[in-house]
Image: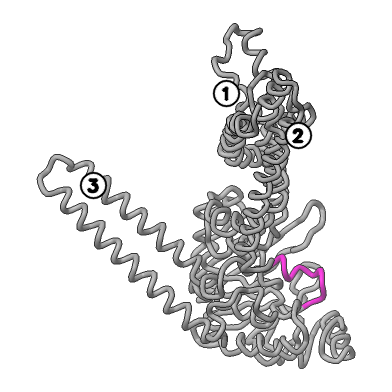
Amino acid sequence: MSFGKVFLALLEGFGVTCTIFILTLLFAIPLGLVIAFGSMSKFKPLRYLTRGFVWVIRGTPLMLQIIVVFYVPGLLFKVNFTSRLMAVIISFVINYACYFSEIYRGGIESIPKGQYEAGKVLGMTSSQIFFKIVLMQVVKRIVPPMSNEIITLVKDTSLARVITVVEIIRQAQEIVSIYGILWPLLFTGVFYLVFNGILTLLFGYIEKKLNYYQG
Amino acid sequence: MALLQVKNMRKDFDRLEVLKGIDFELDKGEVLAIIGSSGSGKTTLLRCLNFLETPDKGQIYIDGELIFDAEKDREVSDADLREKRLNFGLVFQSFNLFPQYSALKNVTLAPSLFVASEIKQKKATAYKEYLKNIFVKGSLKKFREERAILGEQSKNLREDIEKRALKLLDKVGLSDKVDNFPCELSGGQCQRLAIARALALNPKILCFDEPTSALDPELTGEVLKVIKNLKSKETTMIIVTHEMEFARNVADKVIYMANGIIEEMGTPEEVFGNPKSEKTRAFLLKDDLSGGKYGV
């Protein structure tokens, strides 16, 4: 099989990888904020429930979660997923939202109490204090841990193949087993490296942009 | 009538009684200095006045009007609390400036948020009015006109806020630092900016919580000078301070606090010159011995 053909086939798989990546980010970033608020809630039952949920999600392998999300609805309620990709994305969103929520929580709790108090004595509402004062400072603080997590997400997408979603690694494996050549599997690493390289540059740029102030 | 009256204010933290019944009055244009050793409840008193802590007992009157009564107001709504707070401004020991905004934006942020929410409310009312009369001829045109007027109003108000902020920054000697961020300012400049920010909302009473304690000795002078210059018939101030000389020169009234009560209250001459209480005398003597700066 020629290099061009392999490349195109891998590119097709990489498209699926990117779909999982982008949709996961799109939904997990806001959902993480909701979970973060839940885990910081003053209402104890909600706080314990959210923290328990985060514990379960962070305490079990993502591979297992994908299997559970895909098979359990069918076993219990006889409802099956029409799209395997959908099941993958749902489990990824839940998993990553939990990790993000902990990063958000750390960021929000690291903002000094004085910032809230300054907002209060200036007569701001709680939502004004959060959106106009705290959020921007949180964003600056969480860019490094978030970029870490997001780069991990790029590579975690390969777990989708556990329910036979043909992302790039699965695609390469199929080529390997059909044509008996190994290099396409190794070549997938180039796709990951290039993609993560771009992301690294992007995060570096964002960090630099946010560096217009200190503290 | 006194501008501010505080009656029997008490505050506990768990079992620790921090304020054990504070009573005092303050007239418009007066400067009150609160002195006392650390842990005597000075800061807690100031935080109670600004509703950062809720007093357990006591009343606060402004212009003779009861604005807070611990008996009834244990559970006040956020909106009410905000309104009560606006009678007071507070300058913190550690500045608490907003690091992501320029000096100017630090001053304009709170007032422009006020204007924005007011205009938003008016727009919503105009819209409701329009929906009510949606089938009346010319109602859309009227609504559009109203919206344009409100837009114009908001623009003018914003400009006013900015002009006022620039004036305030000039007053505290920061007219050349308008576009700088807090991280680019010295400690003294930060505190002066914080003073301008607190003034932007025109509080009836401006409170200072040890405004120079976080500063290097050579920077305290510029901040104290700004505070001194604020003194006028219109500005009423409460200053918690360890700067005895300053309290003596600027204050009209001095309170010496010890263990959560007012140990001595009077004019600076009375408190510093001829203290009646043994505790006050001991405190001032200790201060004298340490070269005029308590605790150093």
Image position of B24 (left or right of B233): right
**Badge nearest the viewer, 3 or 2:** 2
Nearest to the observer: residue B110 or residue B4: B110
Tell me the distance, in whole angstroms, between the alpha carbons under discs 3 and 2: 68 Å
User: What residue is pinned by disc 3?
Assistant: B129
Q: Magenta part of the protein: which range?
A: B36-45
Mark 2 lies on a secondary structure that is helix
Q: Residue at x 64, y 37 (%)?
A: A35
Residue found at the very far front of the displayed protein: A2
Mark 2 Cα-neighbour bin, 10 Å: few <14, some 14–19, many ≥20: few
Tell me the distance, in whole angstroms, between the alpha carbons under discs 2 and 1: 27 Å
* Callouts 2 and 1 on one subunit: yes
Q: Mark 3: which amino acid?
A: Glu
Residue A104 visible in the snapshot: yes
Nearest to the observer: residue B90 or residue B51: B90
* Callouts 3 and 2 on one subunit: no
Q: Quadrant of residue B90?
A: bottom right
Q: Is residue B108 above or below residue A76?
A: below
Residue B50 position in % (x across, y down):
61, 64
Residue A183 position in % (x across, y down):
75, 32
Residue B81 visible in the snapshot: no
Mark 3 lies on a secondary structure that is helix
Work out whether mark 2 precedes mark 1 in sequence or the reverse, and give the earlier one: 1
Residue B41 counted in the magenta span: yes
Tell me the distance, in whole angstroms, between the alpha carbons under discs 1 and 3: 46 Å
Q: Quadrant of residue A118?
A: bottom right
User: What residue is pinned by disc 1?
Assistant: A86
* Callouts 1 and 3 on one subunit: no
User: Which label was assigned to residue A186?
Assistant: 2
Nearest to the observer: residue A88 or residue A17: A17
